[in-house]
Amino acid sequence: MTTTAELLQGAAALFPDEVVTRADVRHLDLPGAGRFALITLDNGLDHTKPTTFGPQSLGNLDKAIDQVEAEAAKGEIVGVGITGKPFIFAVGADLKGVELLTAREQAHAIGKGGHDVFKRLSSLAVPTFAYYNGAAMGGGVEVGLHCSYRTVSAAVPAFSLPEVFLGLVPGWGGCVLLPNLIGADRAVSVIIENSLNQNKQLKGVQVYELGIADALFEGADFLEQSLLWTASVLKGEIEVARADVDRGEAWDQAVARGRAIADSKVHGAAPAAYRALDIIAAAKNGDLRAGFDAEDDALADLIMGGELRSGLYAFNLVQKRAKRPAGAPDRSLARKVTKVGVVGAGLMASQLALLFARRLEVPVVLTDIDQERVDKGVGYVHGEIDKLLAKRRINGDKANRLKALVTGSLDKATAFADADFVIEAVFEEMGVKQNVFAEVEAVVKPEAILATNTSSLSVTEMASKLKHPERVVGFHFFNPVAVLPLLEIVRGERTDDASLATAFGVAKQLKKTAVLVKDAPAFVVNRVLTRFLGEVLASIDEGTPVEVADRALAPLGLPMSPIVLLELVGPAVAHHVAGTLNAAFPDRFGVSENLGRIVAAGKRSIYTYASGKPEVDPEVAALFQVGDKPQTEEQVRERAENAIAEEIRLMLDEGVVAEAQDVDLCLITGAGWPFHLGGITPYLDREGVSERVNGKPFLAPGVASVPA
């Protein structure tokens, strides 16, 4: 029979470049309790390089447990604790190693190896304690779940079981131990709901309130207080009481709630959430061994599946590629920005003013055509700052400072004379924007950057009448500005490197994911969305029932259906962008006459929600004029997928972005495209659409796909 050590040695051979985590054992005397062994997980790197568990790292922990197990058996220690290096407890399996696995038995070995090591903590002859001193995710959370007791620091910024988000299940005990510790409903929230809500993280206080940790201590002296608490537990002075877990109908209801959440988020298109829920459902009987075996099998299946590969591909895009934007100029060329001007004081402009003030902490001044608009814009920003204060996300001093930074003016000359960066967010019409830039150029200093938040218009044409078009750059945010990370930075034909470098520098300060985009109609996100939405609307115009067309793309697991997306974007905006693209590419982009009728009638949506569920608004239905060539869901889906594949290939051929990865990064961070799809190009490759439409895949073999 293969031992744990042999299992891990075999896995380590597949991953020679692992950043190895040590498991150092030291001993200390707890007041009145006795000699105690403390294991510290540390990869020897600074706190920006989180501690992970690869095969060698698991082997090191296994050896440390060998040592403390022997000490416990001899009566030399009264307990064992495990903690992490400063700011980091551990963040789970090393995902770089997971990507290297090519066979199911290898994947199964990783799952079983983690279980075999971690569960030893629960079978020692002395109590075990986990001290969550910093960020803990995945396997970092799970190693603590195998301990007898847990404490958590109030300063912990991120605590989660994010596996479902990536296309896995919590596979080292999470699906089994967590519901048996805090109840199925709370476990479903952590494992399913938080993961599928863009990997929502828990704070230290929440970890304690959920019952995952038995005690909460402040960060400054967390380990010292945890050890004193441990001594009290070992001496019997503190008895840890935990709420009883309801193993009746409440457990089944929790699993059903999890399935409803998964259905609403991925529509059955991604298996990870459902596999996790199956294991949680079975864990109701408390059979840990069977549960761990089920986790091993699920991990093995999912590691070898397309969902995880796409999830890891997407993870690498937002964690790595996003930090090194392709084509960005040398950052040393960037100019310092000490004041920002915003032309316009509407909702988008006000959101921008708030973001610039919060992130850059420099003066921001809004202008508009009358005092009422200006006052409304400044009032909006101040109101949002008050909300942050009420939620205790900022203190009173910070709120007052931010409010003082944001002002309004009717006089561009006075407001913008010393501004380094001026962005316009006015009506989406070329003549209006050209006039605004002409007015601004006349009053700003020569090196000031002029940015446009246009969603579809040509940056080159917008700058064409200026004396210094080289300082104009596209700076396209996505709504809501505070939520969506993407910022499409558009280089006009005459934009110079210094202006572009400044734009990227500002984007980094704003904590946005910046992607360099060529000046092309609608850039990336709006071009892709308009193409596929156009095909859906065209099918409705031709006679396909709205409900059928709207369900057609459900297998993609998108965050919302096409018609709901249309409602979010706004029919007027969608119609305008469609018109822009129709003018540029009339052979591929149509303008729906029915959409035009909706806009003319002032309707905001095709649906009404009066009955509590979406139904076609009778007033909208009365406006429609449709043909007699309805299509099935499958036909509409194939039509839309073919169109997207064609459009992305054309965009790449035109050099709109550097690579297909940038298209995926844009759609993930700007349109909420699902992580489990890896964006759009891996999905099109997996489904054979890329080959069918373009004769070749977008990505190289093995990238975001099942290994050969």
Image (tube, helix red, strand yellow):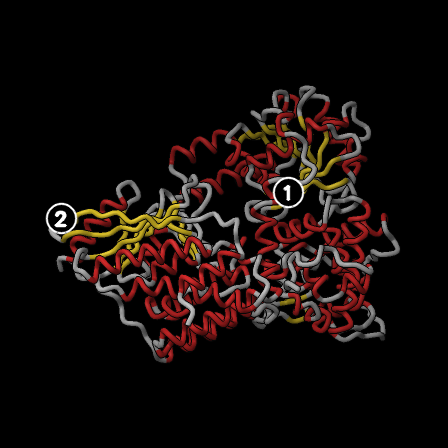
Q: Residues within 10 Å of mark 2 (few under 14, many from 20)?
A: few
Image coordinates for residue 577, horizontal then vertical, percent: 76, 50
Distance CA(mark 1)–CA(mark 2):
55 Å
Image coordinates for residue 138, horizontal then vertical, percent: 44, 58
Give the vertical position of 600 relative to 496 (above or below).
below
Residue 354: image quadrant is top right
Q: Furthest-left residue in view?
A: 32
Asked if residue 459 shows in the view, the reply is yes
Q: In this view, does 363 lie to the left or right of 520?
A: left
Q: Tag 2's secondary structure?
A: loop
What mark, if any, has residue 361 been given in the picture? none
Which residue is at a point 52% across and 54% down the rendered structure image? 15
Residue on which disc 2 sits: 31
Q: Which circle's residue, 1 or 2, is located before the other in the chain? A: 2
Image quadrant where one finds the C terminus:
bottom right
Q: Tag 1's secondary structure?
A: strand
Q: What residue type is labelled 1?
A: Leu
Image coordinates for residue 520, horizontal then vertical, percent: 79, 43
Q: Which amino acid does label 2 sit on?
A: Pro
Asked if residue 347 shows in the view, the reply is no
Residue 512: image quadrant is top right
Instruction: Using the image as rendered, state which of residue 33 and residue 274 is in the foreground.
Output: 33
Q: In this view, does 358 lie to the left or right of 232?
A: right
Residue on which disc 1 sits: 487
Q: Furthest-right residue in view?
A: 587
Q: Are marks 1 and 2 in contact (CB under 8 Å)?
A: no
Which residue is at a point 40% across and 76% down the rendered structure image? 290
